[in-house]
């Protein structure tokens, strides 16, 4: 088991470690996401947090949320007809107290299904929690919340008098 030095910052609301993680609460509130996909997205966000060794809280502090935008929607010319969809899914880490967006990440996914809802669920299933973009997003947020302490100033050696002539 890895051992991390943990630093409490921002009045105890976040937990930062050497792995640059913070305690977050996954929430899906986007009304454009069908009810059937809410739990799927919540589970994906929990996976993203756990894959990046970030603790998850069901408390106020920092929210991990997302929104989905339909980039394209088509009907296939197959029998039976299928709905094909391309989505842009935007993930946000938000400070619940100030409302500031700490970091974002966007992924583009595609899916197909018998109904538009099933096509969206199929697309959302392809989100990869171990995508390096999520690690970068969590690192950016952690750096904003828990900046690195300034490096200790190392005194330079005093110049020596040169006697060689």
Image (cartoon, grey):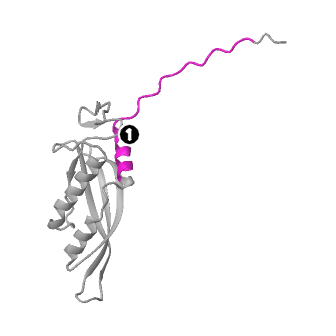
Quadrant occupied by the C terminus = top right
Q: Nearer the viewer, residue 103 or 156?
A: 156
SS for dot 1: helix
158 shown above or below 100: above
Q: Which residues are magenta?
A: 134-161
- Is residue 144 rendered magenta in the image? yes
Residue carrying label 1: 143
- Residue drawn at x 38%, y 39% is 143
- Residue drawn at x 32%, y 30% is 5
In this view, the residue farthest toward the right is: 165
Q: Position of residue 11 (x, y in %)?
A: 25, 32
80 shown above or below 150: below
The image quarter containing residue 140 is top left
138 shown above or below 37: above
Q: Residues within 10 Å of mark 1 (few under 14, many from 20)?
A: some
Q: Nearer the viewer, residue 146 or 84?
A: 84
In this view, the residue farthest toward the front is: 1
Q: Position of residue 25 (x, y in %)?
A: 21, 47
Quadrant occupied by the N terminus = top left
Q: Position of residue 150 (x, y in %)?
A: 45, 28
- Residue drawn at x 34%, y 41% is 142
């Amino acid at each position: 088991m890895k051992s991390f030095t943990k630093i409490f910052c921002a009045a105890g609301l976040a937990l930062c470690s050497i792995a640059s993680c913070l305690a977050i609460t996954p929430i899906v509130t986007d009304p454009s996401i069908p009810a059937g996909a809410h739990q799927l997205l919540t589970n994906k966000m929990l996976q993203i947090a756990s894959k990046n060794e970030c603790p998850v809280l069901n408390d106020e502090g920092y929210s991990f949320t997302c929104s989905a935008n339909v980039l394209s929607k088509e009907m296939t010319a197959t029998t039976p007809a299928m709905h094909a969809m391309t989505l842009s899914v935007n993930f946000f880490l938000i400070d619940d107290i100030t409302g500031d967006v700490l970091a974002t990440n966007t992924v583009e996914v595609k899916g197909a299904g018998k109904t538009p809802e099933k096509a969206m669920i199929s697309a959302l299933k392809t989100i990869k929690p171990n995508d390096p973009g999520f690690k970068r997003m969590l690192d950016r947020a952690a750096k904003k919340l828990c900046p690195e302490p300034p490096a200790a100033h190392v005194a330079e050696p005093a110049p020596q008098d040169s006697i060689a002539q």
